[in-house]
Every structure is written in C-alpha cells, then in structure tokens.
Amino acid sequence: MKVCQGISVWGYRMRVLKFGGSCLDTPDDYKRLVSIVKRYTDGVDTGQAEQVVVVVSAAKGITDTIGTSLERIVTEGDDSLVNQLVFTVRDRYYALIDGTLEGSYVDEAKLDAEEVLTRMERLLYGILLTEELTPRTKDMALSFGERISAKLAAVALEANGSKGQAVEADKAGLVTDGEFGNASADAEENRGEFKTNITSIIDEGSVPVVTGFFGADEKGHVTTFGRGGSDYSAALIAAILEAESLDIWKDVAGFMSVDPKIISDAKVLETLSYLEAAELAYFGAKVIHPRTVEPVRPYCIPIRIRNAFDPASKGSVIIEDCQLHSNVIKSVAYSTEVAVLKVHGAAVGFKKGVLNKLTGAMMDNGINIKSVITSQTCITFLLEQQDLERSKEAINGINTPVVERLEALSDIALVGIVGEGIVRTEGLAARAFTSVADKGVNVLMISAGASSAAYYFVVSGSDIEKVIEAVHTEFFVVTGADR
Ligand code: ASP
Ligand code: MG
C-alpha cells in the first residue's frame, strides 16, 4: 500500500537535498551548496522555513582517483603510491577548503580532513602490506572522499551562520545488505538507530550533512551502493525519514525531451513518472542514477531535479502518476557507452542451460547484462562498453562446446524512446522505426515490451545524430495533425 506522509510525519516541511560530484568541483560549488540550503531554511520557495538533510558525494573525480590508485598499489606494491594518493586527496581538499572558507574555519576544516586522511593512510598501508585488495577493503577505501566532503560542507554551513553537522553514514548506523560494491538497504530497517541519530541532530537545530555512497553491513563493514551510488543513498535517506521530497541539485536544468547538443530546442520535462525517469536513466540520461527511484517510490516521495546554477527555476519533478504527454512519448534518450556481444553457435538457442552458463560466468565476473535476446543460432547480449572485454574473457573461460564464435560490436548506440503508455498506444513503434528507416539507418537490435514505458533499439554509433533527429521530428515537431 502506498502511504504519502511527508509533512504529517514531521509537522513541518523536511526535505533531503543531494549534491553530487559534478556540483562539488570548485569552492564556488560548496558556497552554492550553502546558499541553496539557506533558500530552504529561509523558506524562499514556499514562504515557510523548511528543515533539510543534506547528502553529499565526494568532490568531483576523487572516487575515481582513489579507485585507480588502489589498483596500482596492489599490483605495483610501491609505498610511494600510498603517499602520492594521500597527497593528491589532501591537496584537492585543501584547495577547496582554502577557496571556500576563511580564518579559523580553514583550520577547522583542515583538521577534520586530516583525521579522515589518517584513517585512509592506515588502510592503504594495510592494503600495500597484504598485497591484497578485497571487496571489503576496496569499499572502505573508496568511502573517504565522501567523508571529507561532508565535513567540509558542514564547516561551510557553520561559517555561514547555519549550524551544520557532518554525519558518516556507517557510523550513524545506516545498515545495508552487505553486498560490497553494490549494496542495497531497506528504509524500514533503518528507522531505528540511523533515523534517531539524524532526528536528534535536527532537533538540536542543525543541518545533518550525510555522506552519500555507502553504509555498513551488520558487522559495521563499509559497503558502497556502487559507483554513482550517492543518488541512491539520498533516496534511501529520504525514504527512511519520510521526507516531503528528495531534491537532487545538478548542473543541468532537469530531464530533457532530447539531448540539447543534438536538438537545440530540447525542452525540460516538467513532470515524469517514476517509471519514465528510471527508464531514461537506464538509457543513459545522466540526470539521476538508475537506482534512485527504488527507495522513494513505495512512499510516493517526489524526486525534484533542480538546477544549482538557476535555483529559482522549477526543474523536473518525478512522481508516481503524471498526465500522459500529448504525444505519449516524452523523451528520446541514447547512450553510446554500450556494446553488443553476440555468441554464435548452431544450437545455442536449442541446447538446455547455455544461457544459464553464460550469464553465470558473467555474473561471477561482476558484469551487468543490460539486455539479452536469443535465437536458435545466436545469443545477443547488450552490455556496458566497459564490460565488453571482460565479458569475452568470462565466456572464453568456461567450457561450452556449443559456442562457436564470439562477435563484438562496440561502435554502437542504444536509443530509448520513453513515455508511459507507449506500449498501449498503437502504431508508435511503427512510426519510430519508419522514421529511422527513412534515413537509411539500419537497426541492429530492437526490444519492445520489456518495459511498459519504453522501446529501445540499437544502431551503429555513427548514425546516432541522424536517428535522434528523425525520431525527434517524428514525435516532437508538431504538425497539427498530431494534436
Ligand atoms: N563518489 C561516488 C562515485 O563517484 C558516489 C557518487 O558520486 O555518487 O561513484
Ligand atoms: Mg557522482
């Protein structure tokens, strides 16, 4: 059953705000965070003071930097790499601190950063000495960027006269299911310790600034929600707290009808359904992480995408039900970061258990399969581009005599046409594919029916602009007859 609570739970408006790495790149970004928080606490948008909980990512690029260095530390075993990494992270945050803060706040933030850096350095030496990077130590190591970021943001709030308190999600008792590198967590289960900790900070009149991206398993081991997972964290925290909304502050205006780089009159979508947003995220619209919808949907907490560079603009709102767009189709999205792996063999579609073996091998290697289509002589996997080589290795590494040959297509693009009701409305698929065929483009793979809100197809990467233009013209350039 869906319960929409929000305001009734708190007696005042309580919102969760999320700031991701792309909005935490420069001192101005941290200052912007502070002024956005103030918009809420001053009640600029609603005329009423609002309470907020802030969730932050690491500063832009930090998690990547830690990740790449970790690999080198284990493979090269050189202790100067540990020093280098600590130095790089310190340097980056010190520059942010110096640019964001003044006077004693600088010292305070640097002390906070040092405390985290010391923990990081110890762990890195552990990894170096044992020459072993386990999923557990890796998750722990990846978490340090968020910890410093939260502390910096909290001091920045303080410096601006608002009270801020950094919260390390694992220490505050955010419990996950324990799957390293790809954890999930349950909102209901976190309404005890974690919620109490956050609530008591709010009750003291402070703004909690929580680290995104990770929690801890039942034994207290840090588990991350996967790369880009701080959107998921923020959604989870909004669900735990039964917030009025989850506001994701971005460097874009919202979800768009089409990529503005290809079509200049792309429009911001004012409202989308959870399903549409999830599909668009899946197809590569990098506005939210595909898992963001999951935690908030059962509580019908709206997700609002807001533009940090234009805070007065409305952005996009994601809710359960929203009016059907006049054309049913709301947006055309695409991703070029995909690849196709075809597994050929005369009997692959016929022989029992082949698909199971292949997907098992891929799963063992941590590969996410985006889609699979099978026929008698070929099993076709749609994958993330970055997983292609490892997928080939995984399949080559198992003994499946029916597999005759692998064929990889990497210069391809995945196009998604998204809108609630797409599958229920006659003739849309035909219109989409005719518009593409009219441009002389060959469609390599099609999927319809897997989702009630999306069709997708795969084309050659070099055709992508033509395809987007064709589909956009077909559905968005109103001719009068369509209305
Ligand atoms: N910092 C983490 C990452 O880069 C989490 C996030 O930014 O969402 O993956
Ligand atoms: Mg990020």
Image (tube, rainbow, N blue to C red):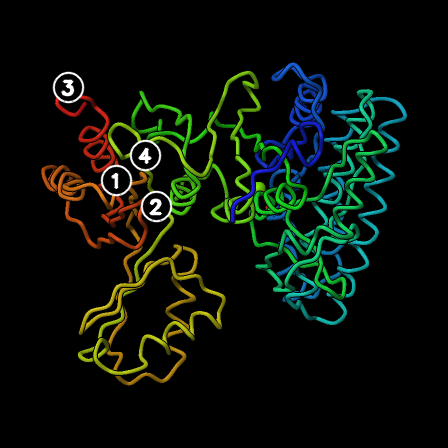
- Between 294 and 124, the one lying in front of the other is 294
Is the residue 79 above or below the residue 116 in the image? Answer: below
Is label 3 or label 1 in front?
3
| Mark 2 or mark 1: whose residue is earlier in sequence | 2
**Which of the numbered marks, if any, corresponds to residue 480?**
3
Q: Secondary structure at mark 2?
A: loop
Q: Marks 2 and 3, Cα distance to the nearest angstrom? A: 33 Å
**Pointer 3 and pointer 4: residues touching (CB < 8 Å)?**
no
| Mark 3 or mark 4: whose residue is earlier in sequence | 4
The quadrant holding residue 398 is bottom left
Q: Marks 4 and 2, Cα distance to the nearest angstrom? A: 17 Å
| Residue type (three-letter) at the residue carrying disc 3 | Gly
| Mark 4 or mark 2: whose residue is earlier in sequence | 4
Label 3, residues with CA under 10 Å away: few <14, some 14-19, many ≥20: few
The quadrant holding residue 62 is top right
- Between 62 and 192, the one lying in front of the other is 192
**Which of the numbered marks, if any, corresponds to residue 336?**
2
Q: Secondary structure at mark 3?
A: loop
Residue 153 placement (x, y as % from top left) = 74, 32
Q: Is residue 29 left or right of residue 255?
A: right
Label 1, residues with CA under 10 Å away: few <14, some 14-19, many ≥20: many
